[in-house]
Image (cartoon, grey):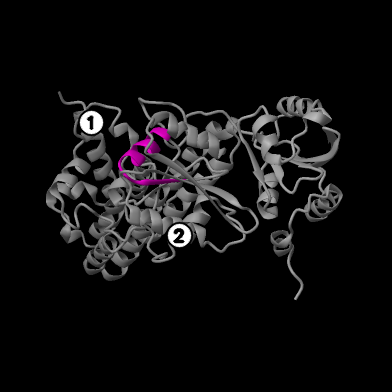
Amino acid sequence: MEKTSLEQCKDYKLTGNLKKDVEYLNLYLKVNQNFDLICRRITIGNREACMYLVDGFCKDDLMQKLLQYLMDIKKEDMPQNMDEISRSFIPYVEVEVEDDCEKIVNSLLSGMFLLLIDGFRKVLLIDSRTYPARSVEEPEKDKVLRGSKDGFVETIVANTALIRRRIRSTELCMEMLNAGKSSKTDIVLCYMNDRVDEGLLREVRSKINHIKVDALSMNQESLAECLYRKRWYNPFPKFKYTERPDTAAAQVLEGNIVILVDNSPSAMILPTTIFDVVEEADDYYFPPITGTYLRLTRFIITLFTYFVTPTFLLLMNQTELVPESFSFILLKEEPNIPLIWQFLLLELAIDGLKLAAINTPNMLTTPLSVMAALVLGEFSVNSGWFSSEVMLYMAFVAIANYTQANYELGYALKFLRMLNLIMTQIFGLAGYVAAVIIAVLAVCCNKTISRRSYIYPLIPFDWKNLKNRLIRRRLPGSRE
């Protein structure tokens, strides 16, 4: 069987013959077909040399200075090995010498500058790369009323620097891995060496090293599906994502692992429980009493988003369950369309509005929002398609979903809410109770990636930890 190009690269050994090595690299890299792969012949110390770089990844002014310095080396000053050139003749910080062909090619394609010199079996790698990047600004989704306004970007080195800026400890480790046969996507494990769960760290590292995929095309989501293959049918999130460096740094200091993936502005936090998912940075940027109020309010409203519409449907189908003091919630008019269909149609319509808002140009967002509110709100009620009570409760659910920032949790509650609506319509009170039990089991039977309980510290019960989860206490070090 004929060897693949990757196997050929692994088998090839640098000969020190510049002509032969350059011919092989030009053929393997397809330099003639790729306009952005630059191969240039130069002379260094009266020896033929060749440099490779990817156009757009290297800093032009820096490369100009390095080349000028190298080309000024005289024949009598030319060292006899590449290691000495690296130590004494390269006025730059990030320099390494390599002879493994596969590593050389991967470094070049990731943006490093490559230098071959005739007579040397090793190659000089200079990390002078720079990536196009947007400015560090507050993320759209993870906004806070008070606190830092910076956020992660798509460049992994910038993201690690934002965490390192907040944790000036020698125990902070940034471990680089990669995954994907074609993409070779960079992945960084961030953790505190003296606080992390060593067993979990070894497991996560092993899983990443053994990922067998062609590319992590969807960044974190692709990685998450490779790391957690069990219970995919359970909609509750197995990971927490954040675009805030302060949140990521706080999680690292608590002993958790933060995973950064190149080309993604989100950090993946693990292990994650349901209490971690609903927690937000604003809880800690306000005094304890205010932070506790915000946290409990978020918990309660999150529960309401699940219970409001199924409970209303149950009471409308079995009006004898409505207390006399709450008779005002009964429908004033007989609906033209059964309530269950109204609720399900509005669940789909809300998602349709979200998708429309994402794809709407910014200049048209406000007028189209007003139009949608008028047409789909008032006119749909007046035309008889929807009852005003149904529109009220669904409007509450749609707005209340934005009290917590986690998309996955919002859709998990949405799927279980729709299941509850359907079971309540078919089986009445028994269906409502059964749907609630299914929702409780979906939360309780879910597991974190470390195989711990998803509702810890409720199960196993830990009162001290549970109290800290529910009540925002004073931060460590704030006491005298």
Query: Would residue 265 be counted in the magenta stretch?
Result: no
The residue stretch that appears in magenta: 245-259
Q: Residues within 10 Å of mark 1 (few under 14, many from 20)?
A: few
Q: Nearer the viewer, residue 245 or 428?
A: 245
Identify the residue position indicated by label 1 in the image: 475
Which residue is depicted at the point 34% across and 41% down? 251
Q: Quadrant of residue 39?
A: top right
- Judged by its main secondary structure, the magenta piece is helix
Identify the element where label 1 is drawn. Answer: loop
Identify the element where label 2 is drawn. Answer: helix
Q: Earlier in the sequence, mark 1 or mark 2?
A: 2
131 left or right, relative to 461:
right
**Three-letter code for the amino acid on which mark 1 is drawn:** Leu
Q: Say if mark 1 contacts mark 2, CB within 8 Å.
A: no
- In the displayed structure, 224 sits above or below 278; it is below
Quadrant position of the N terminus in the picture: bottom right
Visible residue check, residue 36: no
Q: Quadrant of residue 479?
A: top left
452 left or right, relative to 39:
left
**Three-letter code for the amino acid on which mark 2 is drawn:** Ser
Q: Nearer the viewer, residue 343 or 436?
A: 436
Q: What is the distance, in whole Å, between disc 1 and disc 2 at their CAs? A: 35 Å
Query: Would residue 247 be counted in the magenta stretch?
Result: yes
**Where's residue 442, x and y in %?**
30, 62
Visible residue check, residue 308: yes
Q: Nearer the viewer, residue 413 or 43?
A: 43
**Where's residue 474, x and y in %?**
19, 30
Identify the residue position indicated by label 2 in the image: 206
**Where's residue 53, x and y in %?**
75, 40
Q: Residue furthest front?
A: 76
